[in-house]
Image (tube, rainbow, N blue to C red):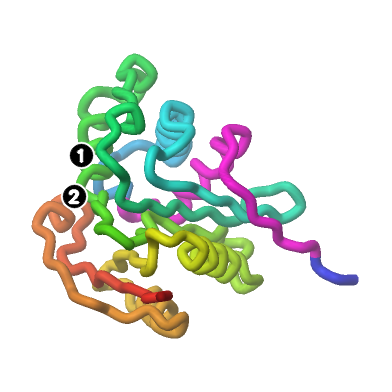
Amino acid sequence: MSAAPLTIEQMQMKYNAQVSRLLVQGFRGKFQSLTNMKDDDLALFFEKLLDHYPHEPFGRRMVVLLEGIVVGTMSIQWKGDSDPELKRKPLSWKSFNRFGKWNLMKMMLGLHFLEHKPQAGECYIADLVVHSDHRGIGVGTNLLQWAKQYVQAEPHLDVLSLFVSGHNERARHLYEQLSFHTKFQRSSLARHIFFRERKWNYMVLRLK
């Protein structure tokens, strides 16, 4: 009996809860250094964030589905124009009151310091997560292949990029096998304070 096929599609609001839990699973270590919030609260925080920002003004989130269940997700971003109508709407703080002001402030500051502003021609992979029960079946490969094809089809894009923690040698070697190379290593005091990770590898894959 053949395995069920993987399908990839653009993010929809109906997947917000599943993607939020997946983000917590994939980046739990980083979030735990920010706050003592439990996994369920962290997932709800990200679900509310996704509800508030259903679409990135200069980006896109994709999901990989296995029999209708989200088993992987990836967010990409690129440099946008200066049209103020395309910028993010202000956050409604009332929706996040249940998390407490201190937790909320730390989470928002931490996410701010994880942000990267792409340069012209750059398609930045802001996050890529594969469910721990579904690794090794091509989920990450499907997402990266989609990203490559997207960059190749867009005349204003020519390179894929991402940051990998200096301590995450396994991820760095994996991306090197996919033809990414480390362009430089950045030392970030802010990321060290918030995530206990000072050194980050900026990796790129030129496609044009």
The kind of secondary structure the magenta stretch mainly shows is: helix
The magenta span reads: 4-30
Q: Does the rendering let one see residue 140? A: no
Residue occupying image coordinates x 41% and y 47%:
59
Q: Give residue 61's position: percent from left, percent from top.
A: 49, 48
Residue occupying image coordinates x 55% and y 69%:
145
Q: Which residue is mark 2?
A: 194
Quadrant hosting residue 49: top left
Please determine whether, in this image, residue 56 is positioned above or below residue 96: below
Q: Give residue 126's position: percent from left, percent from top.
A: 37, 55
Name the quarter where the C terminus is drawn.
bottom left
Amino acid type assigned to the residue bearing label 1 in the image = Leu
Query: Mark 1 or mark 2, which has the lower sequence index?
Result: 1
Q: Which residue is mark 1?
A: 109
Name the quarter where the N terminus is drawn.
bottom right
Left or right, 153 with reference to 125? right
**In the image, residue 90 lies in the stretch drawn in magenta:** no
